Image (cartoon, rainbow, N blue to C red):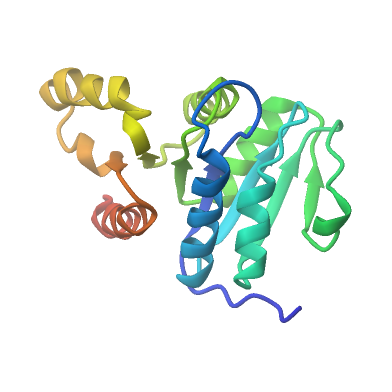
Amino acid sequence: MVPPAVSGPSVAIFASDKGPGDPERASLMSEVGRVFARKGARMVCLAEGGVIPVPLITAARTANGDVEVLADASIVLPPALAEVPITVIPDRVERLARLAAMTQAFIVLPGSLASISALFDAWAGGPPRPVLMYNRHRAFEAVRGFAVDVLAASISGYDRNIQFADNAEDLWGKLVWVLEHRPR
């Protein structure tokens, strides 16, 4: 495989394919992996508790994308992903801090409670990062409602820190906009 050419931002992608949730999440992960790889993003994926976003990683690598996995000690990548760099950090707080330090934004895909829980822990414990949510089938509509009702009224410029998108291309466009409009 040709080494990936990274020209875009480094993003943490929170995605889960375990447990109840959106039945289309594997195809959504694949779509985001392909789009972000083609746009030159460096994707850092969290893998813990047996949850590995395999469709996202596979699609990104197939599109010659740059993907790295930060994992807990329980994770063993499947043989098909043997070439994907993996860093095992047993302590969750350290793992999430490293994830935040390596990335410019957090991308959240519809999935199970595991992905949104990991997002919250990374966001609450690390440096401020913009959060972009793929709101397919209104997966994050409650969060969007909170943002409009509470954040908009109390935090100036909240839209530079949280965005919602309905497809992978829109997600990419909003990521670019957020990174261009963040205070330096």
What's the residue at 14%, 27% (across, down)? 152
Q: Position of residue 145 (x, y in %)?
A: 22, 21
What's the residue at 87%, 42% (across, down)? 76
- Looking at the image, residue 64 sits to the left or right of residue 133; the answer is right
Look at the picture and state if 112 lies above or below 17: above
State which quadrant residue 79 falls in.
Answer: bottom right
Q: Is residue 14 visible?
A: no
Q: Position of residue 124 (x, y in %)?
A: 48, 24
Q: Position of residue 36 (x, y in %)?
A: 48, 62
In this view, the residue in front, 154 or 4, is 4
Q: Position of residue 113 (x, y in %)?
A: 55, 20
Look at the picture and state if 124 lies above or below 76: above
Q: Quadrant of the N terminus?
A: bottom right
Q: Is residue 59 visible?
A: yes
The number of numbered discs placed on residues in the rendered structure image is 0
Look at the picture and state if 69 lies above or below 122: below
Q: Quadrant of the C terminus?
A: bottom left
Q: Residue furthest front?
A: 23
- Looking at the image, residue 98 sits to the left or right of residue 49; the answer is left
